[in-house]
Amino acid sequence: MSLDPELIKILACPEDKKDLIYVTEEQVLYNPRLQKAYDIRNGIPVLLISESRKISDDVHQRYIQL
């Protein structure tokens, strides 16, 4: 399930309040500044800081090249 592009435009990271990158292959919203990913479960972005995942440098490079 893909997120609506209009929704992606208005979503922001709950931690730094800046834009997120939608990584469709992984179904996550990604903050490259903090290297944190937020899962999308059943089409719903889970934008809770406590639920975010720290992303490794290798995965970070892959995400920003998409």
Image (tube, grey):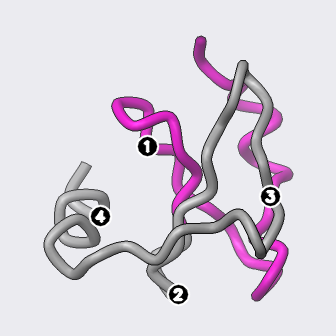
Q: Position of residue 57 (x, y in %)?
A: 21, 81
Residue 35 vertical position relative to residue 4 in the rendered view, above or below: below
Task: List x then y, in percent, for residue 27.
Answer: 50, 34
Residue 8 position, x and y percent, is 72, 42
CA neighbours of label 3 inside 10 A, class few (<14), some (14 to 19), many (20+): some
What's under tag 3, amino acid-wise?
Leu
Cα–Cα gap, marks 2 and 4: 13 Å
Label 4, label 3: how many angstroms apart (C-alpha)? 20 Å
- In the displayed structure, 9 sits above or below 52; it is above
Q: Nearer the viewer, mark 2 or mark 4?
A: 2
Q: Amino acid at mark 4?
A: Ile
The residue indicated by pointer 4 is 64
Q: Which of the pair 2/6 is nearer the observer?
A: 2
What kind of residue is marked 1? Val
Which residues, given as a range, are shown in magenta? 1-30
Q: Secondary structure at mark 1?
A: strand
